[in-house]
Amino acid sequence: MPWIQLRLHTSSEHADTLSDLLLEEGSVSITFEDGKDQPIFEPKLGETPLWDDTVVVALFDAPFDLEPVVAMLKTLPFVGDNLKYKIEQVEDKDWVREWMDNFHPIQFGKRLWICPSWREVPDPDAVNVILDPGLAFGTGTHPTTALCLEWLDSLELDNKDVIDFGCGSGILAVAALKLGAAKATGIDIDYQAIDASKANAERNGVAERLALYLPEAQPEGLKAEVLVANILAGPLKELAPLIQVLVQPGGKLALSGLLREQAEEVRQCYAQWFDMDEPAYKDDWSRLTGVRKSL
Ligand SMILES: C[S@@+](CC[C@H](N)C(=O)[O-])C[C@H]1O[C@@H](n2cnc3c(N)ncnc32)[C@H](O)[C@@H]1O
């Protein structure tokens, strides 16, 4: 079904009011977009911050006469004749298909490839992870996942135990197993991530070497020689006391999900337990690595 879309420039202050009015006028969906390039990272729990210059995008079932809607908007005291808007036709698309068409095999480091499960493997002799992220995070296209995959590829993982804290699609745990790790443990607060990780481990023939847990079910005394956690700076700082005990003395740690400017404070937080390296960067993001001290 085609749609007709009304795009309105406004401020964060008026976006919610306009959204309510447009829903009353018959819009079937409202989204907010950034009107200028103003990134918002890591909002606090329960906060939904908006951009100073917000675009309210209202979708209507086509055909729909938007003239009366625009006329009503112009009567609002905070809008008046300054209304900045655009009306566009939106063609119906198979969004899942579109996403699948845009996801291609990608190489990380020297040995490792992530290959969407619906594509041909470009190099059958490489270490290939066949992946379908499902509803979970982790395709390799995000710089933080890429930084972790490159790190795993650079390690000698033969016979090592690995923990993937915040496993999402299971991409890091499955990659570690295919790169030679003996066992991996994936932990995630989201049961959809646990399901996706299980399916990806099965797809890659490593399911019997991957244990998956919600945090509350994590076994007591769990420890590994390698731990990778791609979450976000806030949770990584809060979880530091829990994460540090999971790494054996001499074991290796990688943390990502950090913006460049957050790397130093997270590095200092983990430096009490780990000999930390200089951060590595990709685009706006960073990765920290370190070796567990024998305390
Ligand atoms: C950015 S995704 C990373 C997924 C995948 N490991 C990757 O590198 O692409 C972060 C994952 O951490 C999980 N997560 C967030 N907070 C967590 C917590 N406190 N304990 C365990 N997992 C958590 C999220 O559900 C999500 O699946």
Image: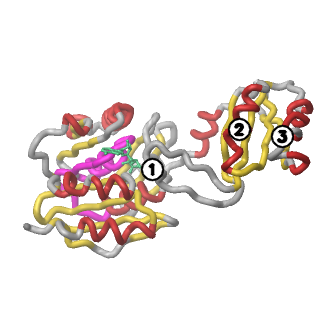
Could you say which is closer to the camera, residue 119 or residue 44?
44
Q: Residue at left 24%, top 61%?
A: 253
- The C terminus, quarter of image: bottom left
Question: For the residue labelled by badge 1, is the local secondary structure a helix, a strand or a loop?
Answer: loop
Q: Quadrant of residue 264?
A: bottom left
Q: Which residue is mark 2?
A: 17
Q: Position of residue 155 (x, y in %)?
A: 26, 63
Locate residue 279 relative to residue 49 in the image: left or right. Answer: left
Q: Residue at left 54%, top 45%?
A: 48
Residue at the bottom extreme, as displayed: 278
Q: Looking at mark 1, is its residue's CB closer than 8 Å to ligand 1?
A: no
User: For the residue marked with disc 1, what is the amino acid?
Assistant: Lys
Q: Is residue 164 magenta?
A: yes
Q: In whole angstroms, how far apart are the C-alphas of marks 3 and 1? A: 32 Å
Q: Quadrant of residue 272?
A: bottom left
Q: Residue at left 88%, top 46%?
A: 80
Number of marks in picture = 3
Q: Residue at left 22%, top 54%?
A: 243
Which label belongs to residue 256?
none
Determine whether 212 is above or below 257 in the image: above
Q: Nearer the viewer, mark 3 or mark 1?
A: 3
User: For the residue marked with disc 3, what is the amino acid?
Assistant: Leu
> Which residues make up the magenta segment?
153-180
| Dot 3 and dot 1 residues touching (CB under 8 Å) | no
Q: Which residue is mark 1?
A: 44
Q: Earlier in the sequence, mark 1 or mark 2?
A: 2
| Dot 1 and dot 2 residues touching (CB under 8 Å) | no
- The N terminus, quarter of image: top right
Which label belongs to residue 76?
3
Name the image colouring: secondary structure
